[in-house]
């Protein structure tokens, strides 16, 4: 009997979980376990994606226990694409981390936590009911905070503590929403809730609580203040995972809820409000990225800015219902590009021993491959042709123009110009004059090449737009 | 009787939120989050009793799972506070006024 897509998806959760347990018990074998279980997870994800591609969306209760007491798994095109995004970025980060993590203490803890985070994110993408989403959300949050605190310095610990408080508050707001929804409808299943949803006061309160809780975790402007210190002070592989994947996980939930459960609750002005927050994020994040003095801070504020694009999904969906597919493709392109940029920044920081932008020029000239990878991924962030970012912005502008939303279309283009400003501000240092830094430490080859490969993936994405949209069309929210 | 528990749960949630914002010591902030969590659990339990004679088992299962999650999260938070205190000498969040890209 052939395994179905859902069997593969269940393995995509179980495999990294087993890997995390083993890596926790045998910290010395962490790198080997991380690599082996990372590859196996990616294989399981490939099976799940092929399953959706051939069989369409599926859902089932784990172990034959159906809802309400069982754990429902649900796999459709959107979930499959998120699994794939996590697997591609996760593999590149795992290989990079082999070279990056040298101190045995950090290394022993990193692999268990990272595989745990990977398993939790996969479980989150596959959850079919609002309470299991709460549990996976909490697992993702705790693993992400632990990884942030990994380096153990005062800055990292403070940032991790703030991140933990925001994350727990967000989860509790979400859980209160779940309680209200169960009180109103007596079901937890996403599809059943979506079918029964009525625009009454309790449902609206639940939607507000859940959305605000998830917005805190997604760090949408003006709830973003915790993000730059956390993403900026974590070790580079962790920063890459946090910025590329973890914030996308809570965004995925916002999108999932507003696509499948809450659409009847929208009130006039709601879309505009969310879009305005997105625009605020785009402008404010970009301005701070232009001003930041340290390379990793530039990249972290760039994340604040780029998250703004994701929330254009609300105003764009109001004028073109299929707009969410363009936004998901943007999230995919951003994940690959942002992870590359953080990995490249980590390599430069390792080589120079610091990441003060003004003094990085000499080191950048000694690391041409890393700077090249930074440049390619930066081009994708800006949205220059031949990159995934270009196709993503093309799709966004296209859906905006289809709905005659000229304002949102020009905002997408203006955001690209601002991104160009901070990307070229960094790259400009590579072309300046100045003496070669005597403290330059060569970057391990495994870090250089894993970064470059991920950069090339963000170019290859430019040719995967049609396939991604076809996969997203297999949407199974309402079975 | 049941509205009383619902209102009590909501009040605990609001009280915890207030303390989380106002209190500055990290242990108090974590306690505030626990109070908020208890508020959510109380709302769930009130909803479970609503049906009549037989209480609904699903919210009870949710609360049990929620307690497990809350215990783990609290343990982790307390461990992190100990590290913050050991490294910085203070159990408070670092001073930070909004965005500071420097």
Image (tube, rainbow, N blue to C red):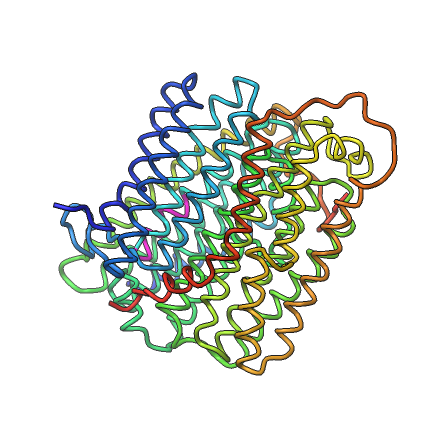
Q: Quadrant of the C terminus of chain A?
A: bottom left
Q: Nearer the viewer, residue A319 or A219?
A: A319
* Residue A197 x/y as whole percent: 32, 73
**The furthest residue to the right:** A434
Q: Quadrant of the N terminus of chain A?
A: top left
Q: Main secondary structure of the magenta part?
A: helix
Q: Nearer the viewer, residue A131 or B20?
A: A131
- Residue shown at 16%/54% (left/top)? A66
Q: Nearer the viewer, residue A1 or B46?
A: A1
- Whether A17 is drawn above or below B35: the answer is above
> Within the magenta stretch, is there residue A173?
no
Quarter location, residue A361: top right
* Residue A350 x/y as whole percent: 67, 27
- Whether A23 is drawn above or below A226: the answer is above
- Residue shown at 57%/37% (left/top)? A451
Quarter location, residue A44: top left
- Residue shown at 88%/33% (left/top)? A434
Quarter location, residue A389: bottom right
- Residue shown at 58%/64% (left/top)? A393
Is residue A357 toward the left or the right of residue A5 in the image?
right
* Residue A198 x/y as whole percent: 33, 77
Residues drawn in magenta:
A128-138
């Amino acid at each position: 009997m052939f395994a179905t897509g859902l069997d593969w998806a269940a393995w995509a959760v179980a495999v990294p979980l087993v890997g995390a347990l083993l890596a926790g018990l045998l910290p010395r074998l962490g790198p080997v376990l991380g690599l082996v279980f990372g590859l196996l997870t990616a294989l399981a994800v490939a099976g799940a994606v092929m399953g959706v591609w051939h069989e369409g969306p599926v859902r089932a209760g784990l172990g034959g226990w159906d809802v309400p007491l069982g754990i429902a798994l649900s796999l459709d095109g959107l979930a499959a694409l998120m699994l794939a995004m996590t697997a591609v970025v996760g593999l590149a980060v795992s290989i990079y981390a082999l070279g990056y993590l040298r101190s045995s203490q950090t290394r022993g803890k990193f692999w268990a936590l990272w595989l745990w985070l990977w398993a939790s994110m996969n479980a989150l993408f596959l959850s079919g009911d609002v309470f299991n989403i709460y549990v996976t959300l909490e697992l993702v949050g705790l693993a992400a905070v632990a990884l942030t605190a990994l380096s153990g310095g005062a800055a990292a610990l403070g940032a991790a503590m703030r991140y933990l408080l925001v994350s727990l508050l967000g989860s509790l707001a979400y859980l209160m929403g779940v309680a209200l929804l169960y009180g109103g409808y007596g079901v937890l299943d996403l599809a059943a809730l979506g079918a029964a949803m009525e625009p009454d006061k309790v449902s609206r309160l639940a939607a507000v609580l859940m959305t605000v809780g998830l917005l805190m975790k997604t760090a949408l402007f003006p709830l973003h203040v915790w993000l730059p210190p956390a993403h900026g002070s974590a070790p580079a592989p962790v920063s890459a995972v946090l910025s590329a994947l973890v914030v996308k996980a809570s965004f995925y939930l916002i999108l999932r809820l507003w696509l499948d459960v809450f659409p009847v609750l929208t009130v006039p002005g709601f879309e505009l409000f969310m879009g305005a927050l997105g625009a605020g994020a785009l402008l404010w994040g970009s301005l701070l990225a232009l001003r930041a003095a340290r390379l990793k801070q530039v990249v972290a504020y760039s994340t604040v800015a780029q998250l703004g694009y994701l929330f254009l999904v609300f105003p764009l969906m109001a004028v073109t219902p299929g707009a969410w597919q363009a936004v998901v493709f943007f999230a995919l392109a951003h994940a690959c590009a942002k992870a590359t940029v953080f990995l490249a920044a980590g390599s430069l920081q390792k080589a120079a021993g610091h990441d003060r932008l003004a003094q990085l020029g000499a080191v950048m000239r000694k690391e041409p491959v890393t700077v090249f990878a930074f440049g390619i991924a930066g081009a994708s962030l800006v949205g220059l042709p031949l990159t995934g970012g270009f196709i993503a912005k093309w799709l966004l502008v296209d859906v905006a123009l289809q709905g005659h939303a000229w304002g949102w279309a020009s905002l997408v283009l203006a955001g690209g110009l601002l991104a160009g400003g901070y990307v070229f501000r960094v790259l400009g240092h590579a072309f300046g004059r100045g003496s070669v830094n005597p403290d330059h430490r060569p970057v391990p080859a495994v870090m250089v090449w894993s970064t470059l490969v991920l950069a090339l993936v963000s170019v290859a994405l430019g040719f995967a737009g049609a396939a991604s949209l076809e996969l997203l069309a297999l949407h199974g929210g309402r079975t | 009787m049941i509205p009383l528990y619902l209102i009590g749960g909501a009040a605990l949630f609001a009280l915890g939120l207030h303390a989380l914002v106002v209190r500055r010591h990290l242990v108090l902030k974590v306690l505030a989050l626990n109070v908020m969590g208890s508020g959510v659990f109380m709302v769930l339990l009130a909803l479970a009793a609503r049906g009549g004679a037989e209480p609904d088992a699903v919210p009870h299962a949710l609360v049990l799972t929620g307690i497990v999650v809350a215990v783990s999260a609290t343990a982790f938070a307390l461990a992190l506070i100990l590290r913050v205190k050991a490294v910085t000498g203070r159990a408070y969040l670092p001073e930070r006024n909004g965005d500071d890209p420097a």
